[in-house]
Amino acid sequence: DGGITQSPKYLFRKEGQNVTLSCEQNLNHDAMYWYRQDPGQGLRLIYYSQIVNDFQKGDIAEGYSVSREKKESFPLTVTSAQKNPTAFYLCASSIDAGDKDTQYFGPGTRLTVL
Amino acid sequence: AQKITQTQPGMFVQEKEAVTLDCTYDTSDPSYGLFWYKQPSSGEMIFLIYQGSYDQQNATEGRYSLNFQKARKSANLVISASQLGDSAMYFCAMREDMDSSYKLIFGSGTRLLVRP
């Protein structure tokens, strides 16, 4: 079945550590996105990528890094520079086909800093 | 800047009844798109319905319909014949174009609880 997978589902990190969240899609979508969700709030954009080997910062990119070496994969690294990384992280992808293009989301990764 | 407002933090509805979830938006762009997503307790965001600003008719998808009132800048979601599985968070979102792509601007969500 086509879809977006994220791993791990839960992740615990000690302060000062970098961690990488995985996002893979087999929908053949060109665009991929990373959002962050804090309790009781909507989603905010961290990074996005339109094509392989190209990505741009979103609204809250500080303390995060990404790569897009393959069309199917868009991993997110939460670095030690991110001051408050505990949150729910959602990856999305879209085919980028005009005004009615829709973003589809993965199941998310819940990151907790101990 | 574009903004989405959802004023109902929580809603109750009796099973099999209809419910309306409110969403108002603010934008100066003449062309825009509005989305509704459902987020069950598992966390995944599930796309429900889309409305384009130039669409002549209100969008419908099965039991979901969008009451789009452009002059009032509102895009309320109507769920007919509520089911227990409809209990979830519901988010209204607006498309905001960026240089080479677009992002979604989300409201704060409404938690819907369907009572048996």
Image (cartoon, grey):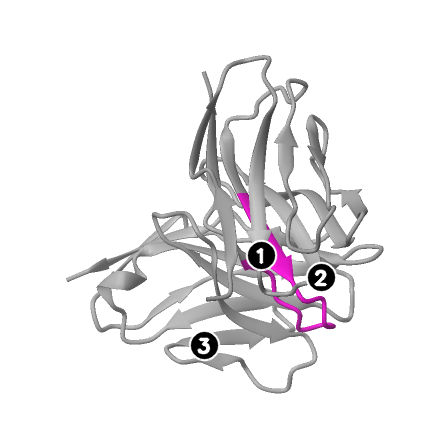
Q: Tell which residue pokes out farthest to the front in this image.
A: A70
Residue assigned mark 2: A30
Secondary structure beneath dot 2 equals loop
Mark 3–mark 1 distance (CA, rounded to whole Å): 29 Å
Splitting the image into 4 quarters, where does residue A67 fall?
top right
Q: Nearer the viewer, residue A68 or B96?
A: A68
- Magenta segment range? A90-104
Q: Name above or below for residue A43 compared with residue B51.
A: above
- Residue B11 vertical placement versus A40 (above, below): below
Residue A65 in magenta stretch: no
Q: Which residue is drawn at 71% across and 68% down?
A: B32
Q: Based on the picture, tell me whether residue A103 belongs to the magenta stretch.
A: yes
| Crowding at mark 3 (Cα within 10 Å: few <14, some 14-19, many 20+) | many
Q: Measured along the vertical axis of the image, is residue B2 above or below residue B71?
A: above
Q: Which mark is residue B65?
A: 3
For the point 63% across and 40% down, the residue is A75
Subunit of label 2: A
Q: What element carries label 3?
A: strand
Q: Which of marks 3 and 1 is in front?
A: 1
